[in-house]
Amino acid sequence: MRLVLVGPPGAGKGTQAALLAAQRGIPHISTGDLFREHVTGRTPLGRQAQEYLDAGTLVPDRVTYDMVRARLTESDAQKGFLLDGFPRTVAQADALAELLAAGGQTLDAVIEFDVPDDVVVARLRDRGRPDDTEDVIRNRQQVYRRQTAPLLTHYADILVRIDAVGTVEEIAEWVQEAVTTPA
Ligand code: ADP
């Protein structure tokens, strides 16, 4: 199964992605996690990405796409994958579609995590990652609305929206339903 999770920062995608990927036996590919690993490891890509992560703006599409493409060509991703945080722009979605099409593949579903702003801000405050300061959170929310939300229209045909307000267990159940009865 090839899935994409979309939702605002703090929607709980990462938590649910890890659960779902484990259940399905497919890799959970989080671009945020990949960038943070590069930053921690002080790789050239990490040095390039750091300023964007710190500011809460998007790492340039080309840099991001090259990293994702490399990850998707690894053997564990051949049986399917769960992308968390990618694509985040329509240009990234187009690049992904082209990459998949070259292998005769398509996405099965895009799951949207629908959650109100106030819930999100509370979750992010509790998480306390370095880019979870008030200014940077606000920036990431704005980036989501401007650059990522257009994906919801772009993927209208395969989009499944889930209500992402609830306990981790409840939301996991709704995610399960969403992937077993795709759009
Ligand atoms: P959140 O969903 O809480 O914003 P992520 O871990 O998904 O957190 O992303 C953290 C940061 O990593 C983003 O603010 C951005 O700088 C960078 N990033 C992650 N995914 C992408 C992407 N697909 N394109 C560009 N930048 C990205």
Image (cartoon, rainbow, N blue to C red):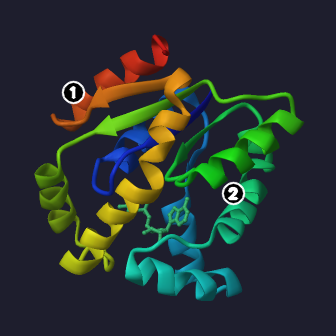
SS for dot 1: helix
Q: Mark 2 and mark 1: span between their CA atoms?
A: 30 Å
Displayed quadrant of residue 155: top right
Other residues around mark 2 within 10 Å, as few (<14) / some (14–19) / many (≥20): many
Foreground mark, 2 or 1, reads 2
Please, is residue 132 above or below residue 51 in the view? Answer: above
Q: Report the quarter where the N terminus lies.
A: top right
Displayed quadrant of residue 55: bottom left
Q: Residue at x 17, y 52 (%)?
A: 117
SS for dot 2: helix
User: Which residue was labeled with disc 2?
Assistant: 68
Please, is residue 115 above or below residue 172 in the view? Answer: below
User: Which residue was labeled with disc 1?
Assistant: 170
Q: Residue at x 13, y 50 (%)?
A: 119
What is the three-letter code of the residue carrying label 1? Glu
Whichever of callouts 2 and 1 sits on the residue coming sooner in the sequence is: 2
- Between residue 104 and residue 146, name the one nearer to us: 146
Residue 128 position in % (x across, y down): 23, 72
Residue 140 position in % (x across, y down): 34, 67
Residue 123 position in % (x across, y down): 18, 57
* Residue 135 seen in this snapshot: yes
Q: Residue at x 78, y 38 (%)?
A: 100
Please, is residue 92 above or below residue 83 in the view? Answer: below
Left or right of 173: which side holds 170?
left
Left or right of 157: which side holds 178?
left
Q: Are marks 2 and 1 in contact (CB under 8 Å)?
A: no
* Residue 42 seen in this snapshot: no
Return the residue found at the far top. Answer: 181
What is the three-letter code of the residue carrying label 2? Val
Left or right of 165: which side holds 141?
right
Query: Does the Cβ of the disc 2 residue fall within 8 Å of ligand 1?
Result: yes
